[in-house]
Amino acid sequence: MADDDLVATPRRRAWWRRMSGRMGSGIRGAFRFRKTLDDAYYDDVLESLVSADCGVAMSERLVERLRERVRSEQIRDAAGATDSLRRVLLDLLQQRERGLDIGAVPSVVLMVGVNGSGKTTTIGKLAYRLREEGRVPLVAAADTYRAAAIDQMRIWADRAGAEVVAHQPGADPGAVVFDAIQAATARRADVVLVDTAGRLHTKVNLMAELQKIRRVAQRLIPEAPQETLLVLDATTGMNALNQARTFNEAVSLTGLVLTKLDGTARGGTVIALEDELGIPVKLAGLGEGIDHLNVFDPEEYVDALFAAGDESVEGSRPGA
């Protein structure tokens, strides 16, 4: 059962302030001053979508969908076409379920991602949000290859008010997960958040270890992990797509978490990821604070793509 309310926060204005200034220059910025609806307009739309990391093939399909909608709705000017493009993107993104499947107790959420993606901090933020909603999270510090990783996880879990199950550096990650699930069951924790090593997508042996962790979890809870979330750095652009392909082949991802969305002008990666892989972006990191993690909201995301960057949050949305 998906929890649509998970980490939904009232910080919508903060979301806008963090996203629209940079991302608004990505898509809308390239053609915002065009008035005439002609081939040059469509060329600019295509170029801006590609530049925003939507991917060439997906960008071409989006432009074709836009042309079809313009024809069917008899749109006559560039302003109307731009509004139609916004609706094309929104229709695409609103098709997916974005709630987390954490109905079972305890549920297991396996967090994977390469070094530097923000995985450990994301776990801390997610634990904090779970606590804010009255849930009891427990963290499994299964990134045992670096002593610093265990220490970092302890720091973030402490900030979030979550317990940590950890072994000594170099211990078997599967053993950590096994003990964490048993502890969660005994302590009646709701969710086990599993931190894993920064797994470079070229390291086949590390991918195999992720599969082992899944098998260990399934020995205790056959349905586990209920969620396998890949944490991606939004500023890496299309490289994120390559990472997602590899991780998905190894561990069957159920969702994506994009960090540093507030630091990129090329937020179209979301569209490329969801189009090619069919995996929804479920959470978005929009800052360094422990409360800077949001459910990914397609409408706010698309609005941010089309914000001019110099407009206020309130002034950039229809009817505001």
Image: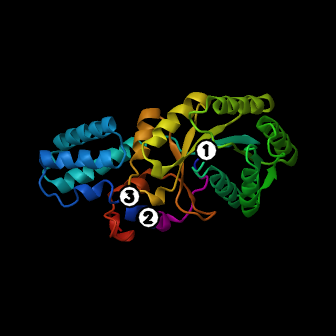
Q: How many marks?
A: 3
Q: In the rendered image, which quarter contains the C terminus?
A: bottom left
The answer to whether mark 1 and mark 3 are in CB contact below 8 A is: no
Q: Residue furthest right?
A: 186
Residue flagged by tag 2: what amino acid is it? Trp
Q: Where is residue 116 in the image (x, y as percent from the top left)?
A: 58, 50
From the viewer's perspective, tell me whether residue 225 is left or right of residue 302: right
Given residues 201 and 81, the one toward you in this image is: 201
Q: Position of residue 115 (x, y in %)?
A: 60, 47
Q: Mark 3 points at which residue?
A: 23
Question: For residue 9: magenta?
Answer: yes
Q: Name the residue under label 2.
A: 16
- The reply to whether residue 113 is in sight is yes
Q: Mark 1 points at which residue?
A: 100
If you read the primary sequence from the N terminus, does the residue marked by circle 1 or circle 3 appear first? 3
Residue flagged by tag 3: what amino acid is it? Met
